[in-house]
Each structure stands twice: as structure tokens, then as C-alpha cells.
Image (spheres, rainbow, N blue to C red):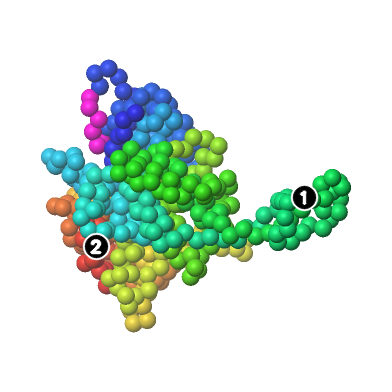
Amino acid sequence: MPDFTVREYAFISIAYEGCPDPTLDHAYISGKAFEHLCGLSASFSKHGAKVFELAGRRKLKLDQYVGVIETPCGTRIEILPKHVELNGTDDQDIIQQERKLLQKMLSVSLHLPYREAGSANLNRFKQPLHEWIMTQFLASFERLVQRGLRFDYNRVQEEQNFLRGQLQHVKYMRQLLTKKHIFPIEHDVYEVNRPENRLIRTALEVVCKKSKDASNWKLAQELRLMTNEIPRCQKIKQDFRQWQSGRLLALYAEIKPWTELILGEYMPVSTQGEWRGMSLLFPMEKLFEHYVAYHLRRNLPEYTVKTQYATEHICQHQERRIFKLKPDIFIECLKAKPIVMDTKWKLIDQSDRAGRYGLKDSDIQQMFAYSHYYLKHDSDVVLVYPYRKDKFTQPLDDFKFRLPSSAKLRVVPFNVDDPKNFKII
């Protein structure tokens, strides 16, 4: 089945005879794949996650989730951020730029040990997201095999014609006289069978089945032969809980996030018991929030940057505080007043004054509540939106709250392509 690449808010329709060629804003898939997406849409809606929106009997509209979805019939849909303006730009150039952005955001948000190793990675943005993840996993696994897999002692109970380890006296005394030459023994075996290796081996099996990239498939098969003695894990969640860390397992820290991505199958809600394939979905709002916070920490080392800071509540009910206020970013410093920030993955236009620049009433009201409860209207609150060439390049004029104080709201752009220069202090 073919793979499709679209962007946020794109449409997905059932393919028909003579339908147009797929674009970044509209893909045409088989009826079976479309039915599966409709089922996922209903499942997600029950849990409050809006991934798809029905736009007719034969059309779905995507929301602010990015990643990869695989259907049982083999159709893969790669969903990229909607960041680069079309304006006659070649689709392949747009795809590479969007993939580059998504990879950087995922590396920051999921704390992925992403390496760029010279010219070998010059074409990495030509790979779909799932192939990029598999490439990073295989590279980490290859380095791990070269440095040496960790072994562990496992307790084994068996019957042998010789004594080894500890004799199980009770079992031996209950044996028939005709079997007295057989010894039930218990001993430790130093082997490669440990939770970390089982999980990595299981992820490798997934890569062998799912990868369509020739170099990935070749390397996966080589590693598969080299680690053939490692069994697959039967209980993935249990083995992840048993994954150990420490000095002796420092080499495994690099590959763990990639293994979690391949086996964890990040989805907005749990779909246990149903087909999931290699599905990886991430909300762009959260990715943008973590990306901004990460670069604020790097650009403002003297400040303390906290995410999802929640110490205040709006209401008091039956002597308990309820309705928590949770700003995206809270910045504090001993020598300056604190600042509250919210990030919004939404395109606004600094020239659209009649349309209030595209700002929502609910966002402004939310920032007013943050200013009141967290800052006592004594400091700034900031809304951060993505930078847009010729559309949103400079901070808007300050919005002053109608209070007898100097409290104000600032709306500033964040250039995801050049985050090193972002400072709001």
C-alpha cells in the first residue's frame, strides 16, 4: 500500500476513479483505511482527544496532532506540522523542512539522544518520521552491540545427571528409586536474557517487519542474526518497569527512548486490544510548549524556567480549592519579577488589526486570570505564537489590562527555525 504525507488540518477522503493526485492538504486513501480512521476518530472522541473531525460522509479533517498512523491494510499516513507557507514552494522542500522541525521538537520533548554524524545524515529529512525513528534505533543498537551487551544471572531449575549448584533435597527424596540417578538442581546461568535486551530485540523484530528503507532493512537483518540468542519479551510493560539504570547500564540509556517509541506506540488515548500498527501521534501544542521552554532554559541560564506550574486555583468549594490554573511556563529570578507565559501553536497576523490579529477571547481571559492569581497584576504575562515571515515578525504593541497597575499582556513571535535568539527578558 502507498504511503501518504499530509500536514495538520489536511483532509483525508476515500479514493475514487479519476480522483486528483494527493497533496499536502488532501490525501485519497482506500475505503478500508478510511473506515479504520473513522473508527479511531470515534474511539479518540470518547476520551476527549480530537484527532479527526468528520467533514462529510467520505471526508475527514485532521486536527493538531502530528506523527504517523498505520492502518491494518498497510496504509501509512505521515502527518507533519503546518509551519512553512506554500506560496509556490516545491512540496519536497516543504516536506523536508517540516520533517526537520518535527524531529527537532520530538528530540527536545521526549529527551531523545539524537545524534548528527556528518554526511551520513545529510539525507535524513527525506525519510518519513517512522523511518527516521527506526534509523536512530538501529544506529544506537549497532553501537551497543559493538561495545558489548550486558549479561545477567538468571536462576534455572532443571534435572540433570550431574550435580551443579544447589540440590533440591525435597524433590530428590520424593523421586522414585528408578530415578535416583537424576538430580533436580537449581543454579544461576550468566546469559544475555535480561529485560533490557528482550525489549530491544522485540523492537528490532518490529523494525524488520515495518521498515521499507533498504539500508534500514539490511542493518536490521544483520543485527537480528548477531543477536539471535536473545528471546523476545512476552510482557512489554512489565519489562519496561524492570529496565535498570546505573553505571553498568549507561550504554543502554541512549537506546531506551527509541525502544519506547517503537514498542510504546504513542497514541492520544489507549486503544488496547485493537490494531495500532506503528502509530505515533503527538499534540503540536505540547511539542511547541516543550520546545519554547527548552530554548528559554538555554538562552536564560540565570532564570528558573518551569513548565506546567500549578500552585493556584480559581475557586474555593466546600473548604477545598478546585479548578487549578496551570500556565505553560513560569519564569522566576531572584533579581527580577516573575513572568507567566502561555504558548499557542496558531498562526496569527500582525496586520489584521480589525480581526484582533487572530487572538481568541478565551486566551486573553486566561492570561488575565494568570496575571491576577500568580502575579497580583504586578508583572507581565506573555503569549507566544509561531513566527511567520511577513505575517508575524515583531511583538505586537502591549495590551494593558484595565487595572490601576502596570500589568500588561505581551504577544511575541517565536522563530522555530532560529530559536537561539529568543529572549523575553
The quadrant in which the N terminus is found is: top left
Amino acid type at circle 2 is Pro
Q: Is residue 114 above or below residue 75?
A: below
In the rendered structure, which segment of residues is drawn in magenta?
20-25
Amino acid type at circle 1 is Ile
| Residue 166 in view in this figure | yes
Please name the residue that numbered disc 2 is placed on.
Answer: 419
Image x and y of residue 137, in percent = 38, 52
| Residue 343 in view in this figure | no
Residue at 17% x, 58% y: name it.
393
Report the side of 150 relative to 344 (left or right).
right
Q: Is residue 406 above or below residue 161?
A: below
**Along the line of sight, the residue nearer the viewer: 131 or 383:** 131
**Along the line of sight, the residue nearer the viewer: 383 or 123:** 123
Q: Is mark 2 in CB contact (under 8 Å) with mark 1?
A: no
Image x and y of residue 331, in percent = 36, 71
As measured in the structure, the alpha-carbon distance from the residue carrying label 2 to the one carrying label 1 is 70 Å
Report the side of 413 relative to 401 (left or right).
left
Image x and y of residue 50, in percent = 42, 41
Q: Seen from this angle, which residue lies furthest top?
A: 17
Numbered circles on residues, count? 2
Image x and y of residue 102, in percent = 30, 51
**Along the line of sight, the residue nearer the viewer: 303 or 20:** 20
Q: Which element carries disc 2, helix, strand or loop? A: helix
Q: Which element carries disc 1, helix, strand or loop? A: loop
Label 2 or label 1, whichever lies nearer to me, is: 1
- Report which quarter residue 145 is drawn in: bottom left
Residue at 47% x, 59% y: name it.
149
Please name the residue that numbered disc 1 is placed on.
Answer: 182
